[in-house]
Amino acid sequence: MVGLNNPGVEFEGTRHNAGALAVEMLATRLGVELKRDRAAKCRVAGTQVNTSGQEADRSVLLAVPLVYMNESGIAVRSIIRRCVLDDFSSLVVVHDEMDIEPGRMKISVGGGAAGHNGILSIQAHLHTSDFTRVRIGIGKPRSRGAGAGYVLSMPRGVHRREFDDGIRIAADALEVILSQGVDAAMRMYN
C-alpha cells in the first residue's frame, strides 16, 4: 500500500499529500512506524495482519515515497522489485483525486490517470495500470488553470474537515482491503 505525496515540510497537510496521510493513519492504527529506506526511496513499514480472527496471516508493506509526486513510479518500481511482486493486483496506490468531492473516496482497479502525475509516473514505470487505486476526493479549484496551486495548498475551515474525513474514510477502506479484500471494500465504499 503506497500513499503518494510530495516530500518536505512545505507540502505537509496539502491536498496532494492525501494518499500519504491515509497510509500514515493506517500505520498508526496497525501500531507500526514508517522508517526511511534509502534503497526503496520511501518511508516503509512492514507488518503481519490478522484477517481470519486467528493469528496473523497476511503481510503488508506500507510505503510513502521520498520522491516528488511526478517521480512516484521510481519509488513504486523500487518497492515492487524489493518485494519481488509480480502480480500488480496486490498493489494498492492511495492518492488525491480532483474529480471526487472532498470528504468522499472511491476504490478502483485499473483505469486512466485523469491527469494525475503520480499515477502517470507509476503507469509509465510499471508498464501497466492493473493495480488498485484508493482515490481520495479533494474537489476542483474554482478556475481551470489553478490546479497546481490548488493541490499544493492546505484546505481550510469546512474544507479541512471534509479533507480530514476523506483521509479517515480512506484509512478505513484500506483496513477493509486488508481484512476482506478489494471487492468487499468496493462494495462497502463505492
Image: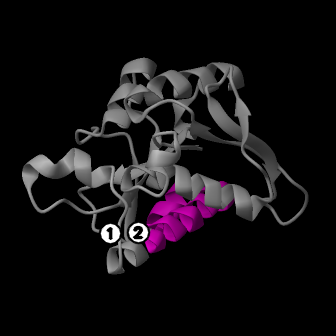
Do the residues under discs 1 and 2 have CB atoms within 8 angstroms? yes
**Where does the image place residue 138, in percent across and percent down from the top left?**
32, 61
164 to the left or right of 30:
left
Please tell me which residue lies in front, 43 or 83: 43
Q: In which quarter of the image is residue 70?
A: top left
Please tell me which of labels 1 and 2 falls first in the chain: 1
Looking at numbered disc 2 in the image, what kind of residue is underneath it?
Phe
Q: In which quarter of the image is the C terminus?
A: bottom left
- Examine the structure image and report whether residue 76 is included in the region drawn in magenta: no
Task: Give the colour scheme shown.
Answer: one colour
User: What residue is drawn where x is 32% and y is 69%?
Assistant: 102
Q: In which quarter of the image is the N terminus?
A: top right
Please tell me which residue lies in front, 1 or 146: 146
- Examine the structure image and report whether residue 176 is included in the region drawn in magenta: yes
Please tell me which residue lies in front, 98 or 82: 98
Whether residue 94 is visible, yes or no, is: no
Give the residue at mark 2: 163
- Assign a secondary structure to mark 2: helix
Residues packed near mark 2 inside 10 Å, few (<14), some (14 to 19) or many (20 plus) = many
Whether residue 173 is visible, yes or no, is: yes
Q: Is residue 188 depicted above or below 78 in this figure?
A: below
**Where does the image place residue 186, in percent across and percent down from the top left?**
46, 61
User: What residue is drawn where x is 47% and y is 43%?
Assistant: 5
**Where does the image place residue 76, in percent across and percent down from the top left?**
54, 28
- Assign a secondary structure to mark 1: loop
Looking at numbered disc 1 in the image, what kind of residue is underneath it?
Pro
Please tell me which residue lies in front, 5 or 105: 5
Q: Residue 102 shows which numbered tag?
A: 1
Q: Give the range drawn in magenta.
A: 164-190
User: What residue is drawn where x is 68% and y is 60%?
Assistant: 179
Q: In which quarter of the image is residue 18?
A: bottom left
Which secondary structure dominates the residues rendered in magenta? helix
